[in-house]
Amino acid sequence: MNEWPDGFSNDDRRRGESEPTRVMGHVQRQGGYPPQPPQQPPAEPPLPPSLSPRRAAAAGGVPHQSSGPGGRPPGPGGAPGGPVTNRPAGDGRRRWPRRVLWTSLGLVGALIITTIATYFWADSKLHRDVDLSKVIERPKGGDGTNYLIVGSDSREGMSAEDKKRLHTGSADGKRTDSVMILHVGDNGNTMISLPRDSEVEIPSFRGSESGKLYPGQGRKVKLNAAYAEDGPELLVRTIEAETGLRIDHYAEIGFDGFADVVDAVGGVEMDIPRDIKDSKSGADFKKGKQTLNGEEALAFVRTRYALPGSDLDRTKNQQKFLAALADQAAKPTTILNPFSFYPVAGAGLDSLIVDKDMGLTDLAEMFWAMKGVTGGDGKSMNIPLAGSNGSNLLWDEAKVKKLVEQLNNDEKVTVSGN
């Protein structure tokens, strides 16, 4: 008996038995049709015996993995039937540029932070104690920049043991042991040593501490007496009055600081041309190349009585030593090594006294120009002399006037010195 509804043929019955029921998502099932379970995806057909999973992956099929039943990769926890993951080939290689980029950015950031921190650290160490605004009747400035570099015999802060070790004596106050003008310009840099025995006239000046105006009285003294009388401000005032050259910046280092810098760089090699023995400076050197420590270096640059030319030969030795010291301090092994750089920079900055307007960029310009000049890139000379008045050295006024004119115009210096 046919139990199918009217209108259904046997062919329709066979189709109903062989085809799964289609569920229409937008039709609400009514009445007695029970809900149908979700359809499971058909199992993957097994690989032919002649085609292994690795070969199938090479042929463009499922990538080679440990397969579960039916050729499917294992699921989470090793359960069979997990999802197939197709990880793109070369994904690890694509991550390398990203890693390199982030590493580079990190290094650049660290470098910037270190540079900024070093700048503020160095800036805080500068002793800006000299006020050039107290200098009166100043000459008009020319082209280029003029630095006055002074080595003083200050013993401030030195113990009795230090004074004995460095052979400095115990004189009160302080005087100039070396005075140099460094001109930095576009047509070559020039360093001019002014012997401390140079005869100068103390001009009118305003006291650096009292603010009192002292009129000029025509007093003739040695150059180092100007410093001893009222410090850096009067020294600058006297040099400007004698030369007509405006001093833009001032830098000074004392005995103890000089020795500390030399020791911080690990000593300085010098080729000493003759045997030198001077009981007053403590110098005791044999001819030839040798590395001088701080104590020995100070004795070398202070020696004058054991030299045939006395003060003039001493200024030449000072310039020669500054060249070697600057070269040692500027070596990559010093600058690029933080274990060397910070002790050297710290010793130098702790020892320097500069003017209130001196910045780190000015200090760097001064150092590199001094290094270049004393190393042979530029002109290094003594102020032109015209004889002496007793133990006082007299300047050649005509040559000095020509020299100052060339410096003010930032011209190549053709004047020769002693």
Image (spheres, rainbow, N blue to C red):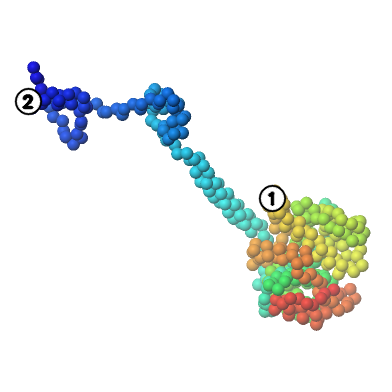
The reply to whether residue 362 is in sight is yes
Residue 112 horizontal side relative to residue 219, left or right: left
The residue that disc 1 covers is 337
- In the rendering, at what x and y percent does residue 407 appear? 72, 76
> Mark 2 or mark 1, which is nearer to you?
2
Callout 2–callout 1 Cβ contact below 8 Å? no
Residue located 10% across and 22% down the image: 4
The answer to whether residue 136 of the structure is visible from this angle is no
Disc 1 packing (10 Å; few <14; some 14–19; many ≥20) = few
Q: How many angstroms separate mark 2 from mark 1 (CA)?
A: 100 Å
- Mark 2 / mark 1, whichever is N-terminal: 2
Marker disc for residue 64: none
Outermost residue, top side: 1
For the N terminus, give its image quadrant: top left
Q: Is residue 80 left or right of residue 25?
A: right
Q: Is residue 200 above or below residue 306?
A: below
Front one among 263 and 28: 28
Q: Quadrant of residue 237?
A: bottom right
Q: Which of these two is toward me, 346 or 76?
A: 76
Q: Quadrant of residue 296?
A: bottom right
Find numbered disc 2 in the image and state the secondary structure of the residue it sits on.
loop
Establish if 330 lies above or below 225.
above
Q: Is 261 on the left-hand or right-hand side of 71? A: right
Using the image, tell me which numbered label, if any, was put on residue 6. 2
Amino acid found under the numbered disc labelled 1 = Asn
Q: Quarter-wise, where is residue 247 in the image?
A: bottom right
x then y, percent, for residue 251? 72, 65
Which amino acid, by three-letter code, is at mark 2? Asp
